[in-house]
Image: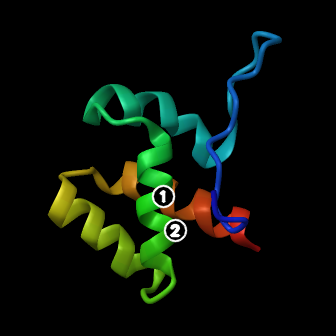
């Protein structure tokens, strides 16, 4: 595993819900049928050479994600890479 890899958050065990962009992750997994870690890995690789909105556009055009879902994944990865 790459030291720069952005890992998916763990679901809280105290009954609380994920906050911020990660709050979309359960819906993304259910809607698109892939684990969120696959999306995070894909976005991490793309952000090396593309802007936030370029990656959002690619997720929408090539993978059929809605804008909010695509934006949430990219925002989460960018925040984790800081």
Q: State whether residue 18 is above or below residue 50.
A: above
Quarter location, residue 71: bottom left
Q: Are marks 1 and 2 in contact (CB under 8 Å)?
A: yes
| Badge 2: residue crowd in 10 Å (few <14, some 14–19, many ≥20) | many
Residue at left offset 44%, top offset 89%: 49
Q: Which residue is drawn at 50% across and 38% down?
A: 24
Q: Nearer the viewer, residue 76 or 37?
A: 37
**Rendered location of residue 73, percent (x, y):** 49, 55
The front one of 22 and 33 is 33
Residue 13: mark in rendering: none
Q: Note whether 31 is above or below 47 in the view shown.
A: above
**Can you tell which quarter of the image residue 67 is in?**
bottom left
SS at mark 2?
Answer: helix
Q: Is 57 left or right of 27, judged from the image as shown?
A: left
Q: Position of residue 50 (x, y in %)?
A: 42, 86
Q: What residue is pinned by disc 1? A: 41
The N terminus lies in which quarter of the figure? bottom right
Q: How crowded is mark 1: few (under 14 residues within 10 Å), some or many (20 or more)?
A: some
Give the percent coordinates (x, y) of residue 64.
18, 52
User: Viewed as shown, does residue 3 lie left or right of 23?
Assistant: right
**Residue 4: quadrant of the picture:** bottom right
Q: Is mark 1 on a helix, strand or loop?
A: helix
In the image, residue 32 sits, relative to residue 30, either above or below, namely below
Q: Kindly identify which residue carries mark 2.
A: 44
Residue 28: x, y in percent?
39, 36
From this viewpoint, which residue is outermost toward the front?
1
The image quadrant where one finds the C terminus is bottom right
On the rendered structure, is 42 left or right of 13? left
- Residue occupying the point 42% across, 51% down: 39
User: In whole angstroms, how far apart are the C-alphas of marks 1 and 2?
Assistant: 5 Å
């Amino acid at each position: 595993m790459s030291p720069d890899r952005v890992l998916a958050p763990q679901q809280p065990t105290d009954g609380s819900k994920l906050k911020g962009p990660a709050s979309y992750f359960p819906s993304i997994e259910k809607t698109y049928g892939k684990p969120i870690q696959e999306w995070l890995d894909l976005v991490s690789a793309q952000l090396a050479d593309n802007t936030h909105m370029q990656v959002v556009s690619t997720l929408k055009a090539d993978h059929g994600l809605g804008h909010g879902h695509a934006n949430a994944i990219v925002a989460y990865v960018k925040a984790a890479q800081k």
